[in-house]
Image: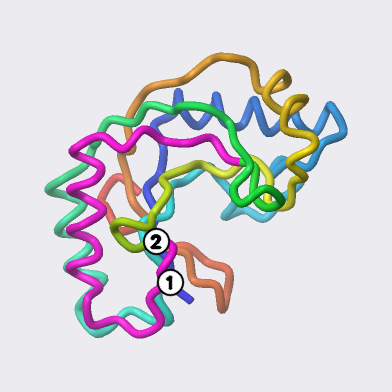
Amino acid sequence: MRTVELVCSPGVEVAVRAVWGRLAAAGLPSLARNIHPTNRPHLTLAAVDEFPPGVEHRLAELFDTMLPVPVALDRVVVLDGSAPLVWLVRPSPALTALHAAVWDVLADADGQRPWHAPGAWVPHLSLALRFRNADLRLARAVAGGHRPTGTFDAARSYDGTDRSVTSLTGRG
């Protein structure tokens, strides 16, 4: 599997990592416990089985043209009641346009994950992967009411086969 992800500006990344740390310190599930070197706050725009020939170059050109885009984080929620704990991202017009453009580039890719498709996509930054809705109130208290803003200023692709990342921008 190959993903297309946006990487947060330093201020947003620091804020998300701080919440990861506070969740872990409170004994709650948290991505702070994932020590793999590729683990960092990111927004997934798409995931496919493999990139068709030339797609990586087309994505890099797209990102070099359209980034940075503003990001504003919203509320902390549990997706689907018992799944990831996430910080929702307000979908600005620039982000929505970028997302649609990425899907246009990936139109011929096999194995598109439908939950990332325009119209179904819920833009978010993950805080914990397995989370019980019953712990949401505590998680919100631990996260605090701060709603960071900044930019998505780079893009990358994660390769699920070898757990590596490839920059899709010169800023990557």
Q: Is residue 126 above or below residue 113?
A: above
Residue 8 percent location from the top left of the image? 41, 37
Looking at the rendering, the stretch of residues picked out in magenta corresponds to: 86-115
Image side of residue 55 versus residue 23, left or right? left
Label 2, label 1: how far apart the Cα atoms are: 6 Å
Q: Is residue 103 above or below residue 40?
A: below
Q: Which residue sits at x=22%, y=76%?
A: 107
**Residue 18: in sight, yes or no?**
yes
Secondary structure of the residue carrying tag 2 is helix
Residue 145 percent location from the top left of the image? 58, 14
Please say if the residues under marks 2 and 1 sit with CB atoms less than 8 Å apart: yes
Q: Which residue sits at x=19%, y=69%?
A: 105
Give residue 109's quadrant in the image. bottom left
Residue type of the residue flagged with mark 2: His
Q: Which residue sits at x=23%, y=84%?
A: 53
Residue 161 percent location from the top left of the image? 56, 78
Residue 88 percent location from the top left of the image? 48, 36
Residue type of the residue flagged with mark 1: Arg
For the residue pair 135 and 154, the one nearer the viewer reads as 135
Q: Which residue is mark 1?
A: 113
Crowding at mark 1 (Cα within 10 Å: few <14, some 14-19, many 20+):
few
**Residue 166: in sight, yes or no?**
no
Q: Which residue is mark 2?
A: 116
Residue 89 in magenta? yes
| Number of numbered discs on residues | 2
